[in-house]
Amino acid sequence: MKVAPAPRPPFLEPAHRRRAQQLVIVAMVFGLPLGGCSFDLGSWGSDDKPKPAVTADKPAADAITPQDINSARDHATRGQVLVHSGKLDEALAEFEQALTTDPYNIQALYGRGLIYQGRGQHQQAIDDFTAASGLSPQKAEPLVGRATSYLALDKARQAATDLDEAVQADPNNVAAWSARGQAYERLGDKAKAAASYNRALALRPSDGNARSGLARTGG
């Protein structure tokens, strides 16, 4: 019996493969259409998040100040620039600094989640997308991000639930419809899968993932 070779450690991966993974993350962060999770972080403003209140059991010194919010926003913006340059470790450090300063910074949560996802750290990505979705429940993108990681972990039912909600929040989100097709295809519901792929193609006729999915499901 042949024994499958052990996975190659990340530091031994060819440079072109590491670069390709970096470009995928760059595209996701800056909203390029990859058929998966995508979103322009800059379109989430600070108005989307609740302001933390000072309570009796939380001293005023621990409250998040406007200066903290501005500083976190600056770190998150620098993180996006670093992602665009392919400097993912530095970008991750900026996102984490943003969240240390302001745990409610949705841009940093989403950006860090995308980096985790691109590195295969799907549970950490799910945690960040969950937090981002809780802070901005009207947005489809954190749900699509979380569903993408659920699919990577073979949790198609959880992914389908998120994607049902995502397409209700944003009926014109191509990535949500395409991913929904994948989720229902894995669940064996070819009718819902084909309907989702059809909707993705109606919105973006060039979507190759949706077209191949439609061919598989007989839509």
Image: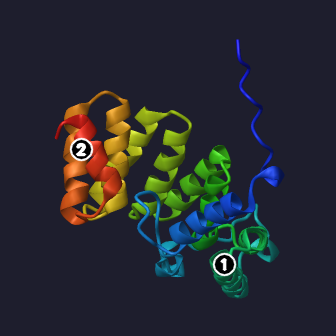
Which residue is farthest top? Answer: 1
Q: Which residue is mark 2?
A: 214
For the residues carrying marks 2 and 1, which lies nearer the camera in this image?
Answer: 2
Horizontally, is 2 left or right of 47 in the view?
right
Question: Splitting the image into 4 quarters, where does residue 65 fall?
Answer: bottom right
Q: Please tell me which residue lies in front, 46 or 86.
A: 86
The N terminus lies in which quarter of the figure?
A: top right
Report the residue at 35% width, 29% height from top.
187
Give how far across and how far down residue 80 sits, in percent.
63, 78
The colouring scheme, among rainbow, by chain, secondary structure or one colour, is rainbow
Amino acid type of the residue that numbered disc 2 sits on in the rendered structure: Leu
The disc labelled 1 sits on which kind of residue? Answer: Ala
Could you tell me which secondary element the residue under label 2 belongs to?
Answer: helix
Q: Badge 2: how crowded within 10 Å, few (<14), some, or many (20+)?
A: many
Judge whether 60 appears above or below 175 on screen: below
Quadrant of the image containing the C terminus: top left
Tell me the residue that label 1 is attached to.
76
Please state which of residues 207 and 31 is positioned toward the viewer in this rendering.
207
Tell me if 3 is positioned left or right of 139 in this view: right
Look at 68% across and 53% down and name the residue there.
Answer: 119
Instruction: Name the residue at 27% across, 64% down.
Output: 206
Spot occupied by residue 186 in the image (x, y as percentages of width and height): 38, 32
> Nearest the camera: 43 or 182?
182
Q: CA distance from mark 2 to mark 1?
A: 38 Å
- Residue 164 placement (x, y as % from top left): 32, 46
Is 199 situated above or below 188? below
User: What SS does tag 1 mark?
Assistant: helix
144 displayed left or right of 22: left
